[in-house]
Image: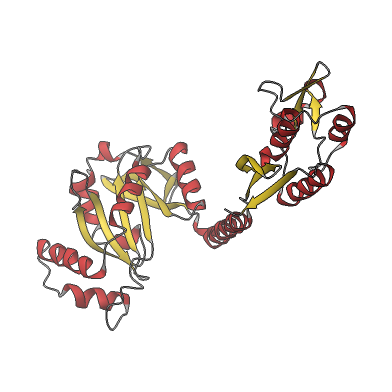
Amino acid sequence: MAIYQVTDNEIKSISRTTFSQSGLKEREDLQRLLKHQIEIISPDTLVVAEEFGEWDESRRRIDLLGIDKKANIVVIELKRTEDGGHMELQAVRYAAMVSTLTFDRLVDIYADYLKANSLELDAEASLLDFLGWSKKDEDEFGQEVKIVLASAEFSRELTTTVMWLNDYGLSIRCVRMHPYISDGKILLDIQSVIPIPEIEDYQVKIREKRQKERASRSSSRDTSRYSIYFNGEQVYAHIQKSDIGYCTVQLLDEKGLIDHGVFEFLRADNTCAFQLIKLESEVTETNKKYNKYRVSRDPELIYDGEEYYVARNWGKESAQAFTVKISNRFPLVSYEMHAE
């Protein structure tokens, strides 16, 4: 988006430039200036370290490390490039590395930062005052690690990755910094790209809704398995529900129990809402698309010279109903369900 200067006679366009063209460097300029005014890109944040890195076997450093008003650790990465590079992946690694920091360790880190910047402040007292705490509270400290990415621009690949990561519970903010030049002066247009300020509350609510839905699906997902017995002897152990029809048909075939009547019984079964056994020619494209029959494998039942495949569309209720139906027809066949 262009920036304009209003004069008495005209609305004058201000030329956009790049950080490299303007001579601004990441560490010497952007990092040096932003650490004293971090609220520009990360509101309600206190910088506690710069070029931070204390992990073994790595020379990587976090540009700026901070803490926010809710006692969350904040990883801040700066880039002057036009696409942001791979800074989101780098920042996620850093976030994992600092996720185990304690309040006491942060006090030591902040004390080093204050000393390096010739600031005569008590590190612990300053942190407590910033957080509004009367005393330290390790249980409330560092519940989340938030990430702030600030760059001249962000590639579509990067923003897509960030939105996907945010959707799965991370908190990553992308702040775009566009440099402009006017009358020999460098101006910065700084805007939050992710989340968009006007709809940030809405985006947060949508993200939380999706996370709750995923958690609900995960908690309600049935992962039970089955063992199949013939005449009291275990034939199949801990099979998935999707294999219960296939293994049952295999068992009946191996025991020589499939005659014309049994075959018609199996052909007519649709306990799982799909016909239990089908010829490949009967399997629809939709069936194939959603892998309802394993037509990419060898035939699963050959009867009277014809090749058949077994449905694998089993849910908890349909699998249980099927086991009852089979056991009633074949008393020697029994099933045991295992909760996983």
Tell me what residue is drawn at x 26 percent, y 66 percent.
102
Q: Is residue 174 left or right of residue 302?
A: left
Q: Is residue 259 above or below residue 127?
A: above
Q: In this view, does 174 lie to the left or right of 130?
A: right
Q: Is residue 146 left or right of residue 220?
A: left
Given residues 182 and 82, the one toward you in this image is 82
Q: Is residue 272 above or below residue 68?
A: above
Q: Is residue 43 visible?
A: yes
Q: Where is residue 267 in the image (x, y as percent from the top left)?
A: 85, 32
Q: How many labels does the image show?
A: 0
Residue farthest bottom in this picture: 134
Q: Where is residue 74 in the image (x, y as percent from the top left)?
A: 33, 59
Tell me what residue is drawn at x 34 percent, y 69 percent.
71
Q: Where is residue 311 in the image (x, y as percent from the top left)?
A: 75, 34
Residue farthest top in this picture: 305
Q: In this view, does 181 lie to the left or right of 281?
A: left
Given residues 155 and 217, the one toward you in this image is 217
How is the model colour-coded?
A: secondary structure
Say which quarter of the image contains residue 128.
bottom left
Q: Is residue 125 above or below residue 49?
A: below
Given residues 271 and 28, the one toward you in this image is 271
Say which quarter of the image contains residue 90.
top left
Say which quarter of the image contains residue 110.
bottom left
Given residues 313 and 151, the one toward you in this image is 313
Tell me what residue is drawn at x 47 percent, y 38 percent.
156
Tell me what residue is drawn at x 35 percent, y 73 percent.
139
Q: Where is residue 134 in the image (x, y as percent from the top left)?
A: 28, 84
Q: Is residue 7 visible?
A: no
